[in-house]
Amino acid sequence: MTGTAEAIALITRARTARELFGDDPAQAARRYRRLARLVHPDSTGDGAGDGARAAFDRLAELWREHRGPARTTIVTRRHSYELSGDPIHGDLANLYPAVHDMTRQVLVKMPRDPADGDLLEREAEALRRLAAEGDPRYLPYVPRLVESFTHHDAGTGVRRRSNVISRFDGFFNLAEVRAAHPGGLDPRDAAWMWRRLLVAIGLAHRAGVVHGAVLPEHVLIHPGDHGLGLVGWCASVIGGGRVPALVGAYADWYPPEVPARQKAGPGTDVFLATRCMEHLMGDRAPKAMRSFARGCTLPAPGRRPADAWRLLAELDDLLERLYGPRHFRPFTMPSRARTA
């Protein structure tokens, strides 16, 4: 098979999915991906006319027949994504667990309101910037952008800007951690989460990115590995400017510059990260730690710490005074793990 015209003819002649794909699953997947790339509307443009679009729609129909009605597959110019399982409902988007090109686990993120596509574009730009300019040692703290594309829903005609990002398997967000510890988390457990969160925002700031929404649902931790992931980059800011949107459920968490629509900076993320940790510990934080947090949440941006790496060193000094030299402290959560 050498080109679009031949692919269109092959798809058009096929009467059944078996006739087009055969019986071998691996061979069927390879043939599907090859055909989809040849007749995808984004690849053919206007040159192949309605024939390519009709062939693409027919190919999708035959693939659904081959895979069964319970599966949904999205094909882009670069990859195919087979959606599986229930979506995760974020503050503005649904995240669909998917298999990327039949092998890797990813999330396909689609805004519920198509008008929020500009926020998905912000996230894609931020993740590209981090991948290109962030310190490779700390990139595991943020999602990897696999692809950003426009999804056309054939049933409704709606077009949505969508991102495909890597998954954090076995992680919990901080809202779930707090719910599992209604009396507040032991500050010795919160300490490693706080340290890693400062690393994550420090990575972003050195790359010129402000996250803009460091909130409990966007901070993920892996209990056993003491891992952390910072997700939800749709409100990010590159090169100055204001945070474009607030998460309504946390409207009173933001520093004054955000609702005032003033310029955001690294201190904006420091403020929000500190609010997360204060909420996580509740009344269990010792006095010295509460004083440290107050200094990080001062209303005036100019008086607030803006260097996450320097703040991390100060936090380490505080923790050593409170608890002595650092050592690994096992941490567990209820058995239900979260993927995000």
Image (spheres, rainbow, N blue to C red):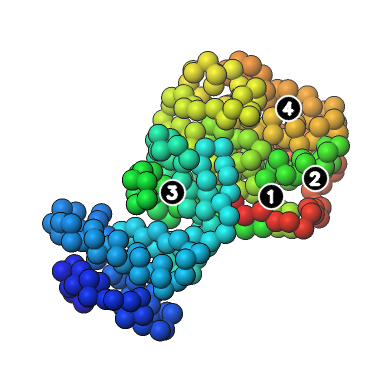
Mark 3 Cα within 10 Å, few/some/many (few <14, many 20+)?
A: many
Whole-angstrom CA distance, mark 3 to mark 2, is: 31 Å
Label of residue 163 in the image: 3
Amino acid under disc 2: Ala
Whole-angstrom CA distance, mark 3 to mark 1, is: 21 Å
Amino acid under disc 1: Phe
Label of residue 180 in the image: 2
Total numbered labels: 4
* Location of mark 1 (residue): 172
Relative placement, left or right, of 271 versus 10 is: right
The spot of residue 299 in percent (x, y) is 64, 16
**Upstream in the sequence, badge 3 or badge 1?**
3
Which of these two is toward me, 61 or 332? 61
* Location of mark 4 (residue): 293
Q: Residue furthest left?
A: 47
Amino acid under disc 3: Asn
**Upstream in the sequence, badge 3 or badge 2?**
3
Whole-angstrom CA distance, mark 1 to mark 4, is: 23 Å
The spot of residue 304 in percent (x, y) is 62, 22
Q: Residue placed at 46% from the left, 41% from the top?
A: 111
**Upstream in the sequence, badge 1 or badge 4?**
1
Relative placement, left or right, of 89 versus 334 is: left
Disc 2, SS? helix
The reply to whether residue 208 is visible in this rendering is no
Whole-angstrom CA distance, mark 1 to mark 2, is: 11 Å
Mark 1 Cα within 10 Å, few/some/many (few <14, many 20+)?
A: many
Asked if labels 2 and 1 touch by Cβ distance under 8 angstroms, the answer is yes
Q: Residue placed at 69% from the left, 49% from the top?
A: 172
